Amino acid sequence: MTLDRFRPVAERILEPFVGIADRIGLTPDGVSVIAFGFASLAGVAYALAGVDAVGPEVGLGAGPALYLVGAVFVLCNGWMDLLDGALARRQGSDSSAGDLLDHVLDRYADIVIVAGLAVGTGAHLIGLVAVTGVLMTSYLGTQAQAVGLDRVYGGVVGRADRLAIIGIVTAVAAGYGAPVGGRPLAVWLLVFLAVVGHLTALQRFYYSMRAID
């Protein structure tokens, strides 16, 4: 992962927003729900924006400009995902229930974003492989904790990196609609998520087995 290295910088940038959220009465759980709402909007935007891998528009044919809308919502999801943890620390309300809710909503957020890309492009099989890779990455991270290890965040691509990549690539797809190698950029994004998702999961599995031994 690369972006997790900049978490201290992100938390300093977040500080004014944490103060505002605290003053207006937001709770960490509420922020987690809002973050999921942004992810859901991103999934809908991607589903309506996509172009089928072989050419014809699918869904409502709303056009690739909606990829930019989806990219903004994805980045908002990532931003709010940082905010909920920082707000919990500010309010002293860290709890196991809040941590569980955050992780459950994060997984559903991952599903709706990737599913939206798959529906919009018509690349359903690639989307299935991508979403299972994303889920296995997260599962292996927490399963390590379940067997007595620390929670594992390592690997090729973590969640922060994944959201940034999805946001950047889909923003580019909004302005560059030409196929690459005969396929839309969104399809190649799904291929990337499928490969790195399962690779990261296997890395975390290997690390956990080594740590247990």
Image (cartoon, grey):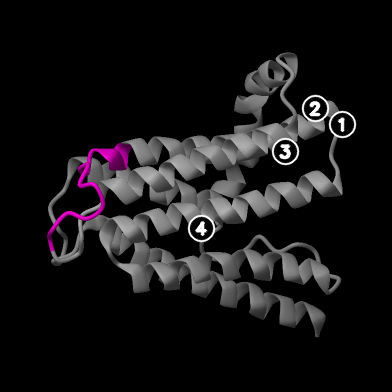
Whichever of callouts 4 and 3 sits on the residue coming sooner in the sequence is: 3
**Eyeballing the image, is 24 above or below 48?**
above
Q: How far apart are marks 4 and 3 (CA)?
A: 21 Å
Disc 1 + disc 3, Cβ < 8 Å: no
**Eyeballing the image, is 174 above or below 196?**
above
Q: Where is residue 6 in the image (x, y as percent from the top left)?
A: 59, 41
Classify 10 Å Cα crowding around label 4: few (below 14), some (14-19), many (20 and above). many
- Residue depicted at x 48% and y 66%: 131
Q: Is residue 188 left or right of residue 81?
A: left
Which numbered circle lies on residue 85? 3
Q: Distance between the residues labelled 4 and 2?
A: 29 Å
Classify 10 Å Cα crowding around label 1: few (below 14), some (14-19), many (20 and above). few
Classify 10 Å Cα crowding around label 3: few (below 14), some (14-19), many (20 and above). many
**Eyeballing the image, is 125 above or below 79?**
below
The quarter of the displayed image where residue 35 is located: top right
The nearer-to-camera label among 4 and 3 is 4
The rendered magenta stretch, by its main secondary structure, is classed as loop
- Secondary element at image label 3: helix
